[in-house]
Every structure is written in C-alpha cells, then in structure tokens.
C-alpha cells in the first residue's frame, strides 16, 4: 500500500511538472549549450559529424528492426533526434558562411544556409515550374473546413482540408492540391475576424506548395521569404478575400503551411493585423514574428521536420511550444465481470497509468513506428497538454478564441497554380 501511494505521489508530481513546465528554462539552456557544442564540432569536423550521425541512425534502424520485426527507417529519426538541431545548425553555418564561434551569439545558422541555397534553388525552380502564380477562388458544397471556436477544432479542420485535397479522405468536395481556406467571423460589435487554414507541402508539379518553396520560406532574408510561392499565394488569397489591415487575423498551418504562416506574420506585418499563429510541425524558431503576434507551436521531438530550423523555439510569454513524445500504446483490454459479480475494469490504449499521462493518436494501430510528422500526432500532443490543465496552454487557447470570437459567416477556398506564362502584376516573383 505504501509503495503504491508513493508511486501515485511521484506520478502526480511528474504531471504537475509537465503541466506547469517547471524545468523548461533549465532544459532550454541545456539544450542550447548542447546544440551550440554540436554546431561548433560539426563546423570543425563535418566528416566526423556525418559519420557519427550516420552511426546513430544505423543503430536506431537496427534496433527498430528488432522491435518492429521488420525494417523501418522511421527509427533512424527517432534515434538521432537529440542531435538533429546541433548538426543541422553546424552545416547551416557552413553554407551561410558563418565563422566558427560566431554562431554562439545567434541561432539562425540554418536560415542563413537556406538563404544561400535559395539563391540557386529559386531560379532553378522557376526554370522547371515557372514563376507565374495564379490564385483563384474555388467553390464546393461540402463542409470541409467547419466553424471553429478553439485551437483543437481548427487543427481538426486543418487535417480535414489537408487530407481531402490529397485524396486521403473523401468528402466529395472536389478540392485539389494547392488549396487553402479563409473564414470570416462576424463579431458581436459588427466587425470581422478572420481565420486562415494552410495545409503543408503537396509536392505537385504546378503547386505553390512544392518542395523547393520550403527552402525559400526558411531563408534568413525577408526578400527571399516573400518570393516563396506558398507565402505569395496565401497573401494573395487574403487580399482577394477582402481582409482589411485593421481586422484581426489568426493563421493555422501544418509543416510548410506553418512556415508560410510565420512568414506572413513576419513579412506582411504592415499589411495585416496578424494576432495569432498556430503551427504544427513547422521549423519557425528564427522567423522574426512581431511581439504583438501570439504563436502556439506544436512539435513532436523525433519528427525531424520541426528540427530543421536548428534551434529551439523562443521562450516568451507570447510564444508557447507544446512538445510531444511518442510512446507505444498497449492494446486495450475489455472490462470483465466474474461469476461472483466482481468487476475488473478495462484499460484504454494509452501509455501511462492515468488519462493525463498521454493522449491516444487517432486512427488504427500501425503495427510499428510511423512518421510522427503526421498532423494526428500534433493533435494528440495538444489534446494531452490541454487535458493536463497547463496554464500556458489555457492562456494561448483563450487568446486564440478571442481572436476568432464570433459567428461564422463564410468559408472560402482558394487554389494556387504555377506556370511559365509571362505576365505582369502580383503573380510574378
């Protein structure tokens, strides 16, 4: 009995530590020191950094093979995630011509490296894909993106739009790749508020949400970020929707969609009143988002994509990072009643002893570890943080709800396409 009581107290203490982020500042300092050390080592000995990271990845692959009973490369990211930011920032510093030791004063080495690459990748992309952007409103009778009054509901709408446009679910909407949604909410005082929903990379040949656009969005330089087709498409759709400069706007995006949202908040700040940005799996640590804009970032520790900025997100009152960790869930067990009427409660398929230890990821069991960059993992992480009663999550949730507080009046969808057509106007880079 005493042992069980002590275990319950220890479990409760851990939940309180998580809910209130009691050691977050110390953890961030340790993480920064570790990453800066790895960055310096990578700059000095890049070949050994690659060999070391490769060895850890190979070990993770073999361990995952033993655990899953089949080869699964996802385990390589799981094994290397503690080293990803430091090694990436080291190579970013080399590409961005940051001198050894100079990077200790900043965290944007990857972004400088991306800026260097984008000087070449942008024109090359234009050569094959074209640089003429066409944005047009598309219509559907299907209710893909529904009314929202919370971050969780908006994340679910983001998932629905992302999967519908790629054919992963069928809502009979007819919406295709390269599509975002813009909703107008009417407040009680008669003014408008807006919510922009931005899915991630689709990789289609004529889509503004291709692979190269990620590099431009990650650039340390505003001029290059503004040339990214996905950011240009979102900005043009917002213009066509009629969003005024003084009307409150919230943006939510997954992966590249979140980077585009951060770019809009950073580089279109003088044109729009961006009050809240929600990102899922987006590497935006070094985007110069104004202090007036609240940022809620949801990341999974081993998803790799969120680590591509080479740094932890800033620890500020207006910027909250919800970090998730994936653990295998046990199989659920049913409740049973024996002949004497004694009931044995069943269990749900979550890791832990209480409903607050973890949140179940939606969907069927996968039979092995899968990529944690899928949006359903970010949804589960945010749900668990909300269930814990985190004061920081509650503050951000309240702010987001305040921004879009009102009655949904319209949901409009905008589709972007790239071409080589020569024309003048906003469509050119």
Image (cartoon, rainbow, N blue to C red):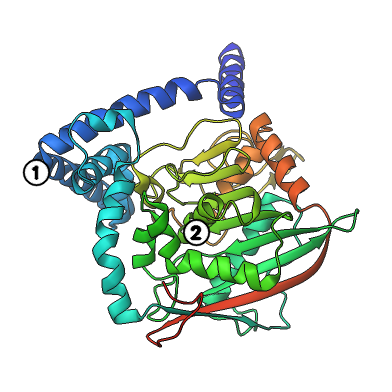
The x and y percentages for residue 348 are: 61, 46
Q: Residues within 10 Å of mark 1 (few under 14, many from 20)?
A: few
Q: Residue at x 56, y 26 (%)?
A: 21
Q: Residue at x 51, y 52 (%)?
A: 262
Tell us which disc is closer to us: 2 or 1: 2
The quarter of the rendered structure image containing the C terminus is bottom left
Element type where label 2 sits in the image: helix
Occupied quadrant, residue 156: bottom right
Left or right: where does residue 202 sit relative to residue 34? right
Name the residue beneath numbered marker 2: 260
Left or right: where does residue 53 sit relative to residue 256? left
Please name whichever residue, 192 or 11, is drawn nearer the observer in this view of the structure: 192
Left or right: where does residue 24 sit relative to residue 63? right
Q: Up-down: is 298 above or below 365?
A: above
Marks 2 and 1 sit apart, C-alpha to C-alpha, by 33 Å
User: Which label number is shown at residue 47?
Assistant: 1
The quarter of the rendered structure image containing the N terminus is top right
């Amino acid at each position: 009995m005493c042992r069980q009581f002590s275990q319950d107290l220890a479990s409760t203490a851990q939940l309180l530590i998580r809910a209130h982020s009691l050691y977050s500042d110390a953890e961030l300092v340790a993480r920064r020191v570790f990453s800066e050390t790895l960055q310096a080592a990578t700059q000095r000995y890049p070949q050994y950094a690659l060999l070391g990271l490769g060895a850890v990845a190979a070990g993770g692959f073999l361990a995952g093979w033993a655990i899953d009973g089949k080869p699964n490369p996802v385990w390589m990211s799981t094994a290397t995630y503690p080293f990803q930011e430091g090694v990436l920032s080291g190579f970013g510093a080399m590409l961005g011509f940051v001198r050894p030791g100079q990077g200790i004063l900043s965290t944007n080495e990857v972004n400088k490296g991306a800026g260097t690459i984008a000087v070449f990748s942008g024109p090359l992309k234009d050569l094959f894909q074209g640089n003429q952007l066409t944005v047009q409103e598309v219509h559907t009778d299907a209710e893909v993106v529904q009314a929202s009054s919370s971050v969780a509901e908006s994340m679910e709408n983001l998932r629905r739009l992302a999967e519908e446009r790629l054919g992963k679910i069928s809502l009979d909407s007819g919406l295709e790749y390269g599509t975002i949604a813009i909703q107008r909410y009417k407040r009680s005082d008669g003014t408008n508020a807006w919510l922009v929903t931005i899915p991630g990379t689709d990789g289609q040949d004529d889509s503004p949400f291709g692979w190269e656009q990620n590099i431009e969005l990650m650039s340390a330089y505003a001029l290059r970020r503004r040339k990214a087709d996905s950011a240009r498409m979102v900005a043009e759709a917002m213009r066509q929707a009629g969003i005024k400069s003084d009307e409150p706007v919230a943006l939510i995006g997954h992966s590249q969609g979140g980077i585009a949202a951060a770019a809009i908040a950073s580089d279109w700040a003088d044109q729009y009143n961006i009050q809240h940005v929600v990102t899922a799996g987006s590497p935006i640590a070094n985007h110069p988002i104004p202090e007036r804009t609240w940022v809620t970032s949801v990341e999974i520790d081993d998803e790799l994509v969120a680590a591509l900025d080479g740094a932890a997100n800033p620890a500020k009152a207006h910027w909250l990072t919800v970090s998730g960790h994936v653990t295998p869930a046990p199989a659920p067990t049913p409740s049973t009643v024996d002949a004497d009427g004694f009931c044995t409660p069943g269990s749900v398929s979550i890791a832990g002893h209480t409903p607050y230890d973890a949140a179940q990821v939606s969907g069927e069991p996968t039979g092995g570890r899968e990529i944690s960059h899928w949006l359903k993992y970010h949804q589960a992480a945010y749900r668990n943080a909300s269930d814990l009663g985190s004061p920081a999550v509650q503050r951000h949730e309240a702010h987001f709800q305040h921004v879009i507080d009102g009655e949904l009046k319209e949901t409009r969808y905008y589709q972007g396409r790239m071409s080589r057509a020569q024309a003048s106007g906003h469509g050119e880079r």
